[in-house]
Image: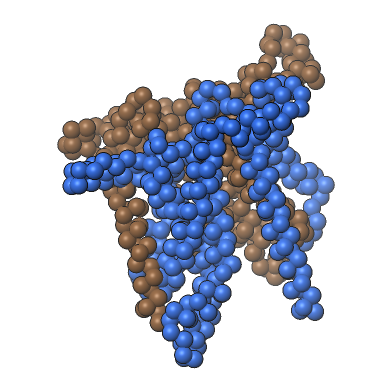
Amino acid sequence: MRKNNSLFNRFFMVLTFVFLYAPIALLIIFSFNAGSSNTVWKGFSLEWYGKLFSNRIIMQSVYTTLLVSVLATVIATVAGTFAAIGFFAMRRKIRDPLMTVNNIPMMNADIVTGVSLCLFFVAFFGLFQKVTGTRLTLGFGTLLIAHIGFNIPYVILSVGPKLRQMDKNLIDAAMDLGCIWMQAFWKVILPEIKPGIVSGALTAFTMSIDDFVISYFTAGSSASTLAMTIYGMTKKRVSPQINAISTLLFVTVLVLLAIVNIREARQERLAAKKHI
Amino acid sequence: MRNKLSRFAIPYVVWMALFVVAPIIMVVIYAFTSANGGFTLANFARMGTYGVVFVRSFKLALIATAICLLIGYPVSYMLSKEGDRFQRIAMVLIMLPMWMNFLLRTYSWMSILENNGLLNQFFQKIGVIAAYNSIFGTNIKYFHMIGTPGAVVLGMVYNYLPFMILPIYSVIIKLDHSLLEAARDLGANTFNVFRRVILPLSLPGVLSGITMVFVPAVSTFAISQMLGGGTQMLLGDLIEQQYMGGAYNPHLGAAISLVMMIIVVVCMWVMNRFGEGEEQAVML
């Protein structure tokens, strides 16, 4: 198996990565363009970066995006971890149908999830108004609920396997040694499943940042994420300011991921040394 | 202990009832009612007039899925043969584009494929267009790329290729190497090891990759609007128009959504039949 790839195979891989990154590279290059075109290079300038910070619509939508992603990730990670533990402790007969329902938002097309939530919220608001007389509308609250909803399944899916790998006797041992169940949770279960929680949170955050379709159907007109602002612009003209903000976000993520990966690699090397 | 822990799931079960099950029931109710609230099947009957859109959606999504598989499988297979460090970096590189919003990446393709876009500028510079004109006796100034079905397929492949690579790769990387050695010891050549051992064992990853590409591709609306230039309406566009566009009709939109849900259920059923309980592969 571990035969190295031929030159042709390597070339094919490189070509795939060029395909994936060419449009991104173009976006970044044209964020430094002096002109406002995305096809004609007029010289280097930082004009769009300057204008970006005084553009209230873009800054507001960046803020909304980050806020909803962070809040949804935190809430979904906590809720998803507890739910995964609960599912794990259930009998199979009850767990399996619940897991099927849990998988629905992940498997369903985004647009169907968005439409179904939109219909549900509108119907609920209608009922709410009849009962209490207060009018509610789609906005940040519904956006947040939607994001939490599609994030939790990813957390459960990455915490679940870690629970199953865990030695079940550990919990019983902790209890026998006098832990109450809350202590058993904090001192035994949590450290065991931590890697699953971290990767679940990371996936959830990625999904939230990248989401457009579900947000589009659940945010109404009062809240707008960056993706929604971009979508609104694509119908007319996309300002290079969008290239600029995307470049900034992209570089931030690139640096963060590089740091995380270098640290992980270093830790693995240290661990390997210890074993020898 | 175990029983106490299972209580942890109660809040989420309530949540699912409210925000997963109830919304789907709403879709079903809307799909079978008319604007004045009575039961009707007219919403499904009206879908017949959009037969072209259904056919186009399936055709383009299937082509895009096939291309993703043809690129994604070899790439995953080759990646698994590289060193650990290379694999780690490659995986990050495959996930990374997701951090630049897909609308922007698609928008970038617009400026590449436009009539005066970068690709046509490039073709003009290196003389491809002049050569084409002299060979075929035509007099074109650019290749018409944007607004064609091909451009939409390209957008789908570009956006969903990582969803094909990741599940296939995660299955191939976990293959038991002793099986491959056993196959070789028993006299199989490289091709046979691949065909008889690697390919069948990686099938669950392939199936989950196919679902993960096909479902978003068949339901997309932004990609078709941007790269199809309004001429390539897909199912997603049709639904979107019923809610956000000019043709406001939530009942018809719900009916199409319901059909789409059934498509997904069929996909999942097929996947479960072939790939017995490979949950791991579904994960990114």
Q: In which quarter of the image is residue A86?
A: bottom left
Residue lying furthest right:
A7
- Quadrant location of the N terminus of chain B in the rendered image: bottom left
State the residue at coordinates (52%, 22%): A236
Res. B158 image quadrant: top right
- What colour has chain B? brown
Residue A116: which quarter of the image? Answer: top left
Q: Nearer the viewer, residue A46 or A179?
A: A46
- Nearer the observer, B249 or A30: A30
Q: The blue chain is which one?
A: A
Return the x and y of residue A25 as percentages of the image width and height.
71, 36
Q: Is residue B119 left or right of residue A206?
A: right
x and y, in percent, of residue A145 in the image: 40, 50
Rendered location of residue A121, percent (x, y): 31, 44
Between B176 and B181, the residue placed more toward the observer is B176
- Residue at the spot x=77%, y=24% of the render? A43
